[in-house]
Amino acid sequence: MYNIAFCDDERISLDIVSEKVSGEFSRLKYPIKEHRYEKARSLQKDITDGKKFDAIFLDIAMPDFDGLNLGMWLSEKCSDTYIVYVSSRSELVYRTFRTRPFSFLRKNHLDRELSDIIGDLCKQLQQDSSDDYFEIQLDNNEMFKFHGSNIIYIELKGKNCKVVSTKGDFTTKCSLSSYVDKLENQGFIQIGKSYLVNYKYIFQIRSNEVVLDDGKILPLSRYKAKEVKEKFIELVGKD
């Protein structure tokens, strides 16, 4: 059972979106529990009080505290909750990127876009509940959920580790060796004493460095170069 929240200050729109989304989840045989909100502040309060949601369908343009404000707060406090922005104003989509939303759904294209978005969301939720989904403790003592596929690389920084992911960068109290234990069977390669890299984000391996898809360059230990290249070729061959 997945907890899905809907937030829209227009009651008619709130009812239409929640009913159509719930219907699509039902069609795909994914049970959900609906939570409807007409004010972003009310949703924020419930989350602050401990209520957790797997995904939130969030209207952008709302009075007082709008969807973008709530989205920014969610990206910091509940980054494991997926945000789907819902709006009739397509020009606002670019303003949502800072909050790293899962998707953007146009109200006037619900029937055309809903099926693909919910299908993708269901796949992600199912993936998140698999065995390679785990929790780590951040340096502020908060717990954060990670799925291996969301992590790009992990860097040892003194006594802590920096996790660079598709959801942002986080500092954790875990040792690099603890990540090696958790992720060695999920396609991660230790390229030196300070770096553990997800092979899916590797673009090129050179003699003394690893180039990621985004152009980021990480140092490659010359003692591990042969091993890293062989491991990378092995993992790519399994795809």
Image (cartoon, rainbow, N blue to C red):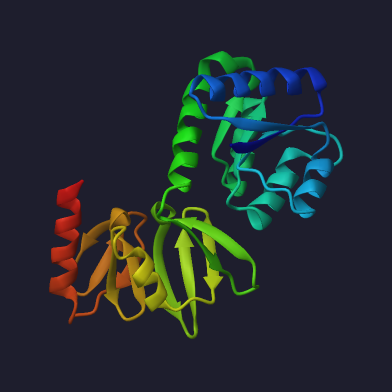
User: How many numbered marks, from 0 up?
Assistant: 0
Q: Give how far across and how far down residue 38 sits, in percent.
A: 82, 31
User: Which residue is situated farthest in the bottom direction here?
Assistant: 158
The part of the image, by quadrant, that contains residue 66 is top right
Taking the spot 74% from the left edge, 45% from the top edge, the residue there is: 70
Using the image as rendered, state which of residue 133 and residue 236 is in the foreground.
Answer: 133
Examine the rendering and report whether any part of residue 160 can be seen.
Answer: yes
Which quadrant is home to the N terminus? Answer: top right
Examine the rendering and report whether any part of residue 207 can be seen.
Answer: no
The part of the image, by quadrant, that contains residue 108 is top right
Q: Give how far across and how far down residue 103 sits, in percent.
A: 54, 35
Taking the spot 83% from the left edge, 36% from the top edge, the residue there is: 39
Horizontally, residue 65 falls left or right of residue 5, namely: right
Q: Give how far across and how far down residue 41 sits, in percent.
A: 83, 43
Taking the spot 30% from the left edge, 53% from the top edge, the residue there is: 200
Q: Is residue 31 above or below residue 127?
A: above
Using the image as rendered, state which of residue 185 and residue 38 is in the foreground.
Answer: 185
Taking the spot 82% from the left edge, 49% from the top edge, the residue there is: 45
The part of the image, by quadrant, that contains residue 56 is top right
Horizontally, residue 145 falls left or right of residue 234, namely: right
Q: Is residue 67 above or below residue 178?
A: above
Horizontally, residue 142 falls left or right of residue 132, namely: right
Q: Give how far across and how far down residue 15 sits, in percent.
A: 74, 20
